[in-house]
Image (cartoon, helix red, strand yellow):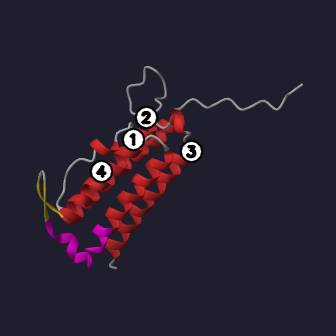
């Protein structure tokens, strides 16, 4: 594996790992909870799913020329538990790995691919995908920090 492909592969693998780490910090009932009633930003779970959707869409396009937005099958009503989210992230990772298996050397990243918005160099597509996915991941981290903390159980029984 050439250096640039290896770097991209590591970055996407880290992204996948971080999705799992984020949902492990959330209770099932707080996956899609907003930081406050008046908060107009997305929930932590929604941001994490958005991050994964960006990767799924790009690699669905690379591997099967399916550029559909995975919005319909990634709704909170569908991905209701950390387990279901985890399974979805693993499906996205499998699609991503199939995409990387197509790259023989760094020269492949100079090839043009046809996207819904027009022709784009593969390296540019990967970088754009990574930046957008990381942006949503960062938003998820920020939202997680803003969630109200559950009160600790008191050890004072007397």
Q: Residue at x 40, y 52 (%)?
A: 88
Q: Is residue 47 depicted above or below 121 in this figure?
A: above
Q: Residue at x 34, y 68 (%)?
A: 97
Dot 3 falls on a residue whose secondary structure is loop
Residue labelled with disc 4: 54
Q: Position of residue 120 (x, y in %)?
A: 14, 60
Determine contact: label 1, label 2, CB under 8 Å. yes
Q: CA distance from mark 1 to mark 2?
A: 6 Å
Tell me the number on the disc at residue 47.
1
The disc, 3 or 1, on the residue closer to the chain's N-terminal end is: 3
The disc, 4 or 1, on the residue closer to the chain's N-terminal end is: 1
Quarter assignment of residue 128: bottom left
Viewer-closest of 84 and 92: 84
Is 104 magenta? The answer is yes
Q: Position of residue 76 (x, y in %)?
A: 39, 37
Dot 4 falls on a residue whose secondary structure is helix
Q: Residue at x 30, y 50 (%)?
A: 54
Q: Is residue 8 depicted above or below 79 in this figure?
A: below
Tell me the number on the disc at residue 71.
none
């Amino acid at each position: 594996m050439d250096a640039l492909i290896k770097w991209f592969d590591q970055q996407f693998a880290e992204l996948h790992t971080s999705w799992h780490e984020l949902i492990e910090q959330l209770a099932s009932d707080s996956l899609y909870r907003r930081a406050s009633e008046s908060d107009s930003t997305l929930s932590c779970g929604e941001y994490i799913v958005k991050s994964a959707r960006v990767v799924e869409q790009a690699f669905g396009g690379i591997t099967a020329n399916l550029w559909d937005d995975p919005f319909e099958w990634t709704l909170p009503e569908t991905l209701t538990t950390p387990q279901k989210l985890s399974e979805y992230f693993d499906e996205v990772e499998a699609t991503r790995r199939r995409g990387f298996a197509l790259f023989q050397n760094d020269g492949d990243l100079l090839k043009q691919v046809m996207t819904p918005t027009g022709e784009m160099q593969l390296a540019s597509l990967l970088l754009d995908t990574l930046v957008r996915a990381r942006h949503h991941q960062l938003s998820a981290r920020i939202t997680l920090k803003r969630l109200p903390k559950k009160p600790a159980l008191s050890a004072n029984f007397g």
